[in-house]
DNA sequence: GTGCTTGCAAATTCTTTGCAACTTT
DNA sequence: AAAGTTGCAAAGAATTTGCAAGCAC
């Protein structure tokens, strides 16, 4: 199994924000201060965020920003496939940057820090499972949870 | 990989309802007509249901039942571990009977018909994945989606 | 009888929509 | 200038809470 540890660093944050701005422009959208702030908040986050959390983090940089703008920007980013909705059992509406290739999330239960990983072998198993049950498997949804290295060491995030 | 095709039949529905009633009693709860109806609706469903759907199906048997009672009964069943919340990308609050052993759901995208399956080998892969990423994997969440045999044949559910 | 349960109404929370003013290109 | 975007306020949807009456044990 191939693994890709794609934790986001400062350099990549900027890059992701730039790509997102480019995609927005390309689809006829416009780059405004509120959007730049929201894009940056989501792109630089190590964990999935709720609309409320995006809103609160954005207000630190742009106090008069509106929650509605956050919702509409997320909607646009999702339509462009740049962010994904992430579901937990209690939290269903968090957003996290998506990956170009087909990967899955591993989320830290303590601090929420998340990484993507590749799971081609696992996906082959899914097909076999479906055949046994008489289903044609067309999609899957996999998320792992656990504790990241920082939290194992007892660090505060 | 061991597979368990545990589609629910009439005989099992009754049995599940009875077990649920017993668990309710054991935990100090009471068996009332509204609860019996709700339990039966959920136990006999081949697919995850929203609170609204449980409500509507229950009203056919007990017209004056309240949506609030459905919410509270689901809450109780979930607390007892008898039903699970099932999430899709758009639908986050559906309920489906849980399994005693550790299994995963395969949901038909057409009709919602769902079956549980066993995936021990897959779970071993999850552990390996976690190690590679520096995480201690403590939980996972896996759902497959596809098309069931009936829908492949073009039957109407 | 005691204590859990019900259903109504109201409150709360989350998300979406209408709209006039304002920016971006 | 044209078209997209913003933030406010209001609407809408989903879920939870308070409470008096009712029911199970």
Image (cartoon, coloured by chain):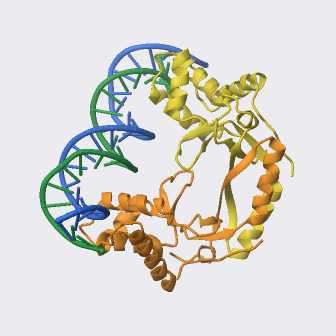
Chain colours: A orange, B yellow, C green, D blue
Residue A61, relative to residue B87: is it above or below? below
Counting from the top left corner in percent of width and height, residue A76 is at: 41, 61
- Residue A36 in the figure: left or right of residue C3: left
| Residue at screen point 76% across, 26% down | B9
Image quarter for residue B18?
top right
Which one is in front, B60 or D25?
B60
Residue C2, relative to residue D16: is it above or below? above
Counting from the top left corner in percent of width and height, residue A64 is at: 23, 67
Which one is in front, D3 or B156?
D3
| Residue at screen point 59% across, 40% down | B79
Which one is in front, A48 or D16?
A48
| Residue at screen point 70% across, 29% down | B155
Question: Which image quadrant: the N terminus of chain A?
Answer: bottom right
The answer to whether residue B144 shows anywhere in this view is yes
The answer to whether residue B31 shows anywhere in this view is no
| Residue at screen point 59% across, 70% down | A100
Residue A112, relative to residue A86: is it above or below? below
| Residue reaching furthest to the right | B2
């Amino acid at each position: 199994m191939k693994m890709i540890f794609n934790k986001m660093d400062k350099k990549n944050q900027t890059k992701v924000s730039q790509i997102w701005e480019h995609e927005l422009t390309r689809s006829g959208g416009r780059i405004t201060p509120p959007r730049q702030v929201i894009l940056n908040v989501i792109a630089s986050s190590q964990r999935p965020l709720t609309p409320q959390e995006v809103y609160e983090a954005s207000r630190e940089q742009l106090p008069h920003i509106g929650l509605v703008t956050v919702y509409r920007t997320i909607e646009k980013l999702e339509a462009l496939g740049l962010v994904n909705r992430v579901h937990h059992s209690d939290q269903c509406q968090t957003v996290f940057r998506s990956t170009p290739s087909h990967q899955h999330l591993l989320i830290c239960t303590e601090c929420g820090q998340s990484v993507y990983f590749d799971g081609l072998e696992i996906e082959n198993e899914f097909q076999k499972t479906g055949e046994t049950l008489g289903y044609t498997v067309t999609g899957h949804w996999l998320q792992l949870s656990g504790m990241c290295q920082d939290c194992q060491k007892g660090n505060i995030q």
